[in-house]
Image (spheres, helix red, strand yellow):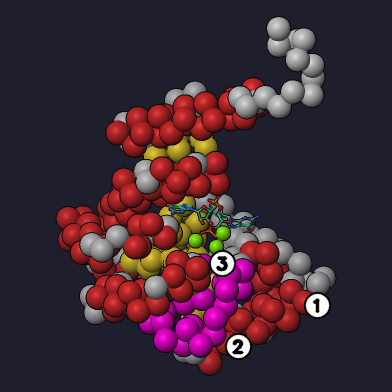
Amino acid sequence: QAKAQGRNTLCFFDPAMQAAASARSALEGDMRQGILRNEFLLHYQPVVDEAGKVLGAEALVRWNHPQRGMVPPGDFIPLAEQTGLILALGRQVLTMACRQLALWATAPHTADWTVAVNVSAQEFRQPGFADEVLSVLRDCGADPAHLKLELTESLLLHDVEDSILKMQALRTLGVGFSLDDFGTGYSSLSYLKRLPLDQLKIDQSFVRDVLTDPNDATIACTIITLAHSLGLDVVAEGVETEGQRAFLLRNGCQQFQGYLFGRPGPAELL
Ligand code: C2E
Ligand code: MG
Ligand code: MG
Ligand code: MG
């Protein structure tokens, strides 16, 4: 009967669409289980100064999936955001990062390291976000002054007044704020000056071709100048070569992160 309708019949349940939908719900179920079973862990990537000295690290979540192995965040963060699972996952991430911070505080050569944690829009928008961060810091015995939260432009500009209040509540205790992937979002400069930020991170898309693409070089240099004139630190992300480092350094960049200095890995390997 189906065959008689011919191949041009519009089929509501497209098998490919159905397969994608069931893969998604399988992944969602796996993720729910994975959170309960503590399958998520953090890798750390060093952030260094002009001299190459480690200042701290960015915590980057990975999923050690029982069948698939180590899954990168790009493969599950979007679904975690769509399903709301990011709230439970984000709390685990923050807790793991703060435990690491408390551990670093106990050894002389790591005692002043900072940890940077990426925060999703949904997490930040929770009314109790600031209190949650403070209670995790307290439970872990971690120093708030060594925690940096990485936010994005779209997240901050969604509700600027609310963003400022939350940031101020955390800043009074010493928590720092970094604007991640800077230059790829709305870049509303009038809001930028109102936000109580500490740091801009130059997105890796501008760093990649900084030596060969004059536009990227101009953008990178403009971000560095902008950061300095606003009194902010600037970190270049995705630095892979000595040439990129030298160019950015010459143009005033003081902090660097990228494969040149270290790939993300277990804390023990930092
Ligand atoms: P991001 O915060 O901008 O992190 C930097 C990404 O660039 C990381 O990818 C890192 O591994 C990669 N990277 C670092 N150095 C280099 C380099 O020299 N070259 C290249 N090509 N790449 C480099 P990763 O770990 O796959 O994370 C991707 C994104 O996932 C992050 O981008 C962040 O937006 C998100 N993410 C990671 N962990 C978390 C988390 O715990 N919570 C939330 N909400 N998002 C997270
Ligand atoms: Mg980041
Ligand atoms: Mg980034
Ligand atoms: Mg990114």
User: Residue 42: horizontal and vertical position, in percent?
Assistant: 41, 47
x and y percentages locating residue 64 in the rendered image? 45, 34
Check mark 3 vs ligand 3: CB closer than 8 Å? yes or no.
Answer: yes
* Residue 225 tag number: 2
> What is the crowding at mark 1: few (fewer than 14 residues within 10 Å), some, or many (at least 20)?
few
Place of residue 228 in the rendered image (x, y in percent of width and height, measured from the top left): 53, 88
Rendered image quadrant of residue 6: top right
31 magenta-colored = no
Mark 2 residue CB less than 8 A from any atom of ligand 3: no
Instruction: Looking at this view, name the residue that lies furthest to the bottom.
Output: 229
Measured Cα–Cα span from mark 1 to mark 3: 19 Å
Q: Residue at x 50, y 68 (%)?
A: 154
Q: Which residues are magenta?
A: 180-200
Identify which amino acid the numbered label 2 is placed on: Thr
- Decide which of tag 3 and tag 2 comes sooner along the chain: 3
Mark 3 neighbour density, 10 Å: few (under 14) some (14–19) many (20 or more): many
Residue designated by label 1: 214
| Residue type at numbered disc 3 | Asp
Q: State the residue in front, 179 or 115.
A: 179
